[in-house]
Image (cartoon, grey):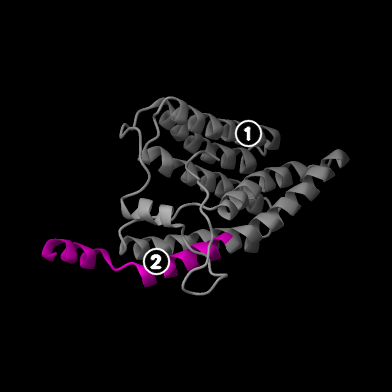
Amino acid sequence: MTGSERQTSVAGAAGGPEAPSIASADLAMLTQGGPPYDTDRVWTLPNLLSFLRLAGAPVVLWLIIGPQADGLAVLVLALGGFTDWLDGYLARAWHQTSRIGQMLDPIADRLYILAVLLGLALRGIIPWWLVALVVGRDVVIAFLVPILKTRGFSSLPVHFLGKAATFSLLYAFPLVLLGSGEQGWLQLAWVLGWAFAIWGTALYWYAGGLYVAQTIQLLRTMPPVHQRIRRGVTG
């Protein structure tokens, strides 16, 4: 993953010592409009690499369900992972981090996961309930966006568990795809893939629960945007 996914501490909040909360630095950053960006330009090399990575997701799906070129599909996934690292490295090294770049990275990750999930399900390699389980978590997070906007921002800082869950899923399903072949030596990939899939899905939902808890904390501790604006005008 790139620098777009930052860690945030999980500390005690109003709900008790075990309740997850946003660190004060992260909360201040979000209230002020998000992290600093080096540029507002869209057409930078890091962003072009991100767009290229996005274009690879439908190619992966076609390779899996069309010619069933599993090895080539995994190669495209590996190239996508490399460009993910490269665009983040170049954005930091060349001071070209941008809002659009930090939005594209998690979108690309989820598109790759969705592409492989759909391909595997359509070929009968994984059950459809697993697709629903992974996609359902993203639907829950999507419903948080309009709630967060009432407090002035559209997303929460990505914490370590969310990062680890996405990492696990990005590796899980390509390994399952490779392990679905008839060669006996690929059974190790099958076992490792399902191990990553089980742990990744569990972590994915656990991280989603933390985001929900953090959103509830924000609703309790921050007034709506219109109230803050009114106070600023009248104060």
- Residue at x 30% of width, y 58% of height: 152
Judged left or right of residue 154, residue 133 is right
Q: Circle 1: is it few (<14), some (14-19), or many (20+) Cα within 10 Å? A: some
Rendered location of residue 170, percent (x, y)? 62, 45
Location of residue 224 in the rendering, given as x and y in whole percent from the top left corner? 28, 67
Are the two marked residues, 2 and 1, in contact with CB atoms closer than 8 angstroms? no
Q: Quadrant of residue 44?
A: top left
Q: Is residue 217 above or below residue 5?
A: below
Magenta segment range?
207-235
Number of numbered tags placed on the structure image: 2
Q: Which residue is mark 1?
A: 78
x and y percentages locating residue 52 in the rendered image: 47, 31
Q: Secondary structure at mark 1?
A: helix
According to the picture, the residue beneath numbered tag 2 turns out to be: 218
Residue in view at x 31 percent, y 50 percent: 33
Indicate the amino acid at tag 1: Ala
Task: Give me the residue at 38% from left, 44% from top.
Answer: 35
Give the number of the mark in front: 2 or 1. Answer: 2
Vertical placement of residue 39 versus 157, above or below: above
Residue 88's place in the image compared with 138, above or below, is above
Work out whether residue 118 can be spotted. Answer: no
Depth order, front residue of 47/59: 47
Q: Is residue 192 left or right of residue 66?
A: right
